[in-house]
Image: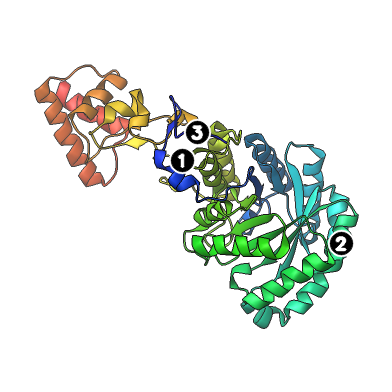
Amino acid sequence: MREDHFEDGKFWVSPYNFIPEVRDNLELPPKVEIHDATLRDGEQTPGVVFSIDDKIAIAQKLSEVGVERIEAGMPAVSPQDEQAIKEITKLKLNSKIYTFARAMKVDIDKALECGADGVIIEVPIGYPKLVTQFGWTWEDVLRKSVPVINYAKENGLHAVFFPYDTTRARASDLENLCKGIVAESNPDSIGIVDTMGCATPEAIKYMVRWVKSLTGLPIEIHTHNDFGMGVATEIAAVTAGAQCVHSCANGLGERTGNAALEELMISLDLLYGYETGYKFDKLPELGELMSRLANVPIARNKPLLGYSNFTRESGIGIQYVMNDPLVMFGTHPAFTGREGEVVLGKKSGKASITFKLDQLGLGEASDEQNAVILDKVKQFGIQKRDILSEEEFRSIVGQVLS
């Protein structure tokens, strides 16, 4: 595990992340894996539908960036979903392939037919779900789960027990279920699922320690982003010992989405010191692929993927954007396959004008001309309520320097 906040020319994050006063209070496991659910949970984004070819392309790109586990879908949803999973397993990717299953043996059979390495076995445990949606008790959940977990294990699948809406479960229900599961079956791990994205990082840390003490099993964490805490709560789980985080590329998923894959990747590596080996320079390619296939635009200020992340409009410090970017950013733009950019608008300064004139080969301006160009740029930016295009800037320069 890396313990440095700086690597020359690549990144420069806070040194306080790595001081003993901070690190000694964390319960970081030696290794953390990412289980990406884009092909299942990501497709549950309203209006998103992936074809078989789409899913194959996404799986290939996920494996290329280094995702350890890919949840390729739920075979029971449709023949097309089943076929997509079969095609993905044929690719023999570096990533392990999982399917999503109900607590039903027929779903385990489907996983086996698809050639999956593992299975996520979903059951409800959140109290609102049990009481209102299903009319079940925790005993019902246990009775349905145990034979299916055992069946999956007997057939050589890695079995993740996934009691969803975990963060809204009654404590007694969850405790009884956890104890019953390990007494009567042997799942490989257990998920804590914040289905409604409504738990705080502190609550998640408590639950990770608690469920681990009840089961002795490795803990996986799956969160949604309803309160904007998806990535934060998954990272909090890691600091309490969780060994696998679930994600969706571009933060896709139901309602406000799941914990974003790309944000988890770079947080684990740069902020918490895991030497992950992920291909960060490939993340823009994955992001663009996902945006195009899902028809969901990437917000321009989205962490890592937004096109304006390394863009500077303010005139202060623009010389560093291109020449010494770690003065202005936590990572060099090239670290994630990007480039720094200087744009012009209301907040530009004289240095911005000089830089753009040189960059576009438009010649030199006197101090007086620079001031006139800057004033016109500012006024244009105010009227447009946006940055100027290259053509608009060229037009202004032509008016002043002609």
Name the mark on residue 18: 1
- Residue 322 placement (x, y as % from top left): 35, 25
Residue type, numbered disc 2:
Asn
Reading the image, the residue beneath label 3 is: 336
Mark 2 secondary-structure assignment? helix
Circle 2 packing at 10 Å, graded few (<14), some (14-19), many (20+), is some
Instruction: Say which amino acid is labelled 3.
Output: Thr
Left or right, 156 with respect to 43, comes to: right
Q: Which residue is mark 2?
A: 150
Question: In what quadrant of the picture does the C terminus appear?
Answer: top left
Disc 3 packing (10 Å; few <14; some 14–19; many ≥20): many
- Amino acid of disc 1: Phe
Distance from the alpha carbon under mark 2 to that under mark 3: 42 Å
Q: Quadrant of the N terminus?
A: top right
Q: Indicate whether 92 appears above or below 359.
A: below
Spatial CA distance of label 3 from label 1 is 22 Å
Pick whichever, 263 or 375, lies toward us: 263
Of mark 3 and mark 1, the one earlier in the sequence is: 1
Callout in the foreground (2, 1): 1
**What is the x, y in percent for residue 338?**
46, 31
C-alpha gap between disc 2 and disc 1: 42 Å
Nearer mark to the viewer, of 3 and 1: 1
